Amino acid sequence: MKLKDIAHSRTGDKGDTINISVIAFDEKDYPIIKKQVTTAKVRRFLGETVKGEVVRYELPKLGAMNFVMQKALRGGVTRSLRLDKHGKTLSSMLLEMPLNTND
């Protein structure tokens, strides 16, 4: 199972910072997301794309969490040489994260 099977995402980007929300389609899946989509796993999954700190904010009443990632846009949307410079690309990438179905 992939994260996209149980969650969707919204994003924002400003300067060299991206925030990516991960929102459970069904609140019963929030504990799975909370347990498996950790800052360490997000950092490892996105690899060299994010060079700065990754901070997770939990929003349990919404069945969501928000990840704020520093130094993720190579200087910002208007300065980056990346082909797609926006957070939406990274959120789509994050939703491809595999989840352990045994948890």
Image: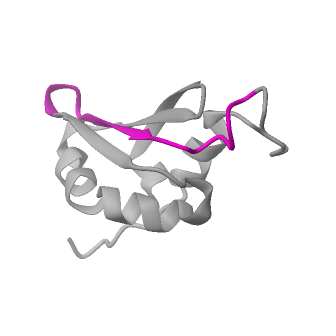
Q: Which residues are magenta?
A: 60-77
Residue 5 vertical placement versus 56 (above, below) = below
Tell me the quadrant of the picture where the C terminus can be found. Answer: bottom left
Indicate how the structure is coloured in the image.
one colour
Q: Quadrant of residue 96?
A: bottom right
Residue at the image position 54 percent from the left and 60 percent from the top: 46
In this view of the protein, which residue sits in the foreground, 73 or 86? Answer: 73
> Residue 20, can we see it?
yes
**Image position, residue 25 (x, y; %):** 35, 36
Query: Is 95 on the left or on the right of 36, as rendered?
Result: right
Q: Is residue 1 shown in magenta?
A: no
**Image position, residue 4 (x, y; %):** 48, 50
Residue at the image position 59 percent from the left and 34 percent from the top: 16
**Image position, residue 6 (x, y; %):** 38, 48
> Residue 1, can we see it?
no
In this view of the protein, which residue sits in the foreground, 99 or 76? Answer: 76
Residue at the image position 52 percent from the left and 29 percent from the top: 11
Query: Is 91 on the left or on the right of 77, as rendered?
Result: left
Residue 43 vertical placement versus 65 (above, below) = below
Residue at the image position 40 percent from the left and 43 percent from the top: 7
In this view of the protein, which residue sits in the foreground, 51 or 19? Answer: 51
